[in-house]
Image (spheres, coloured by chain):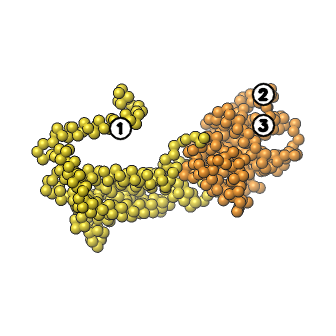
């Protein structure tokens, strides 16, 4: 028991699972105790959650949102890779650094410009998502490049590689697994933004549209149930991207294990 | 003294200086000659010895072409200034690309060697057998022990085909068994080709001197900033080179004391 509050103490997996279960249970009890009036209790939210899961409405809207997110992620990663790979060329470094600073821009003031530049609601949502995601992707990937061990470059030089071959070996091939890690880490941002951009063009539906509708009528039970769905989908993607990374790049899961 | 002759200069360090905010290296001058030993394909094993922090690593990087000196140059292949890629370099922690299997890493090096064109795979297999790594070719570096990584690093640089191999602190952090194996490996490589030249940068005096033919001592001189080559010791002349079990001999221990006195 003492270990649980000791810095850097390691505990058994079983103990950790029990601890998590206890904490979840405590949260539910506290939630149940606090729920009254407009705030729905956990049992009510759970019932709404299962009802939502069985409905066609949720499935259709999830598919719309997922498709849009995946499209945005694909475009974002392509743009990110382009700019970060090119950032090792002095000419493009300033552009990449500018993109990093674009994290501080808010989309709200730019929506009208994007509306003028795009043809329809679908394009508007996609471009806004990409615009919102890319600075975070570029920031993460640039930090990977900055933290590259200088010995990786030295080894390339000693093998007689020129600068382009070094770029290919160390950054493109060597950091390919990190691209998946960045996707995994930043999926949360795109998933967070989807609910916002879907509110801008509601005709195509989507999980964000559904959430806004429930919110409009103060249907807190369904809002919380939908939040739970969004949370679980996020966790699934987190796990999925991690698994794909380990499958495609087996070395990414290796620790220093001595060969027998 | 073992029969030998010293032939042409194969590497020359000329007036090398390195200055950052203060001089680190100054007036570094030495050369390595091809040692011809009847009946052997005897390569050269040269050790650069110096205290920690004296500038050994900087000299190592300059010699490997990874760093440009403030002044002076390192000449190889008949007065050609050295450039990165000319020398095989084995870093202190035997760095390897973590995303490449042993085989892939070796293939990258073999493909840089024009003499191996078309026979890269067979050569890698031969080397792997010789270095007892046949069963490890498809493992990643993270799955190898320190000794195995060292062997892969050496194989990689040998496959690249450079006659010069620079080793940065090759004995650092090795246990007694591994140390013997590393020594054996270096001697094996030194006997693989007449022109093969191993340059060891180390502060492990006993081990490096025991396998070398020449020792250069890097140190500082009173009143002068920056390290320079204080002394060159020809171990062949002293009959200390190429001798097994030399570490127990009195004259070896005297030489070690002499070196320590110079540091």
Of circles 2 and 1, the one toward us is 1
- The foreground one among A72 and B121 is B121
Q: From the image, which quarter does the N terminus of chain A lie in?
A: top left
Q: From the image, which quarter does the C terminus of chain A lie in?
A: top right
Disc 1 is placed on an element classified as helix
Q: Which mark is residue A17?
A: 1
Q: Residue at x 41, y 54 (%)?
A: A241
User: Which residue has dot 3 on it?
Assistant: B233
Chain letter of the residue beneath label 3 in the structure image? B
The answer to whether marks 2 and 1 mark residues whose Cβ atoms lie closer than 8 Å is no
Q: Would you identify the image quadrant in which residue B217 lies? A: top right
Q: Is residue B213 left or right of residue A103?
A: right
- The foreground one among A71 and A120 is A71
Q: Which mark is residue A131?
A: none
Colour chain A appears in? yellow
Chain letter of the residue beneath label 1 in the structure image? A
Disc 2 is placed on an element classified as helix
User: Which residue has dot 2 on it?
Assistant: B248
Label 2 vs 3, first from the N-terminus: 3
Chain letter of the residue beneath label 2 in the structure image? B
Q: Would you identify the image quadrant in which residue B250 lies? A: top right
Marks 2 and 1, how far apart at CA: 60 Å
Q: Is residue A206 above or below residue A10?
A: below
Residue B230 shows in the view? no
Marks 3 and 1, how far apart at CA: 65 Å
Colour chain B appears in? orange
Do marks 2 and 3 share a chain?
yes
Disc 3 is placed on an element classified as strand
* Residue furthest front in the image: A54
């Amino acid at each position: 028991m003492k270990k649980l509050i000791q810095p850097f103490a390691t505990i058994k997996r079983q103990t950790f699972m029990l601890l998590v279960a206890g904490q979840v249970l405590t949260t539910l009890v506290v939630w149940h105790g606090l729920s009254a009036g407009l705030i729905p209790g956990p049992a009510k939210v759970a019932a709404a959650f299962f009802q939502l899961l069985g409905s066609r409405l949720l499935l259709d809207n999830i598919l719309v949102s997922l498709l849009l997110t995946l499209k945005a992620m694909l475009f974002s990663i392509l743009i990110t890779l382009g700019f970060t790979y090119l950032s090792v060329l002095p000419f493009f470094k300033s552009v990449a650094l500018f993109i990093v600073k674009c994290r501080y821009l808010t989309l709200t003031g730019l929506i009208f410009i994007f509306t003028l530049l795009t043809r329809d609601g679908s394009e508007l949502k996609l471009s806004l998502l990409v615009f919102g995601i890319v600075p975070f992707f570029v920031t993460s990937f640039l930090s990977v490049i900055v933290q590259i061990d200088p010995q990786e470059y030295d080894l390339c030089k000693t093998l007689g590689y020129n600068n382009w071959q070094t770029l290919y070996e160390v950054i493109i091939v060597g950091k390919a697994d990190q691209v998946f890690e960045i996707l995994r880490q930043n999926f949360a941002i795109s998933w967070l933004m989807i609910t916002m951009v879907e509110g801008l063009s509601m005709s195509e539906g989507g999980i964000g549209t559904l959430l806004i509708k429930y919110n409009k009528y103060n249907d807190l039970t369904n809002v919380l149930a939908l939040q739970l769905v969004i949370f679980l989908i996020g966790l699934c993607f987190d796990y999925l991207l991690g698994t794909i990374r380990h499958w495609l790049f087996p070395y990414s899961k290796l620790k220093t294990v001595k060969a027998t | 003294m073992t029969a030998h002759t010293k032939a042409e200069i194969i590497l020359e360090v000329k007036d090398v200086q390195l200055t950052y905010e203060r001089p680190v290296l100054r007036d570094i001058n030495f050369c390595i000659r091809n040692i011809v030993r009847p009946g052997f394909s005897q390569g050269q094993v040269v050790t650069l010895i110096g205290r920690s922090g004296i500038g050994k690593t900087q000299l190592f990087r300059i010699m490997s072409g990874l760093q440009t000196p403030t002044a002076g140059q390192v000449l190889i292949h008949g007065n050609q200034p050295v450039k990165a890629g000319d020398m095989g370099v084995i870093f202190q922690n035997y760095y390897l690309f973590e995303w490449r299997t042993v085989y892939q890493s070796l293939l990258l090096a073999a493909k840089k060697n024009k003499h191996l064109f078309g026979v890269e795979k067979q050569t890698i297999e031969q080397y792997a057998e010789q270095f007892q790594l046949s069963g490890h070719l498809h493992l990643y570096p993270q799955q190898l022990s320190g000794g195995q990584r060292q062997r892969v690093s050496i194989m990689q640089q040998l496959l690249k085909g450079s006659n010069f191999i620079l080793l940065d602190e090759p004995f650092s952090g090795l246990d007694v068994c591994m140390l013997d194996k590393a020594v054996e490996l270096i001697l094996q490589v030194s006997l693989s080709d007449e022109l093969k030249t191993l340059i060891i940068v180390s502060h492990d005096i006993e081990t490096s001197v025991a396998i070398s033919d020449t020792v250069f001592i890097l140190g500082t001189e009173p009143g002068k900033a920056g390290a320079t080559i204080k002394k060159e010791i020809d171990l062949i002349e002293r009959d200390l080179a190429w001798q097994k079990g030399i570490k127990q001999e009195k004259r070896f221990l005297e030489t070690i004391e002499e070196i320590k006195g110079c540091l």
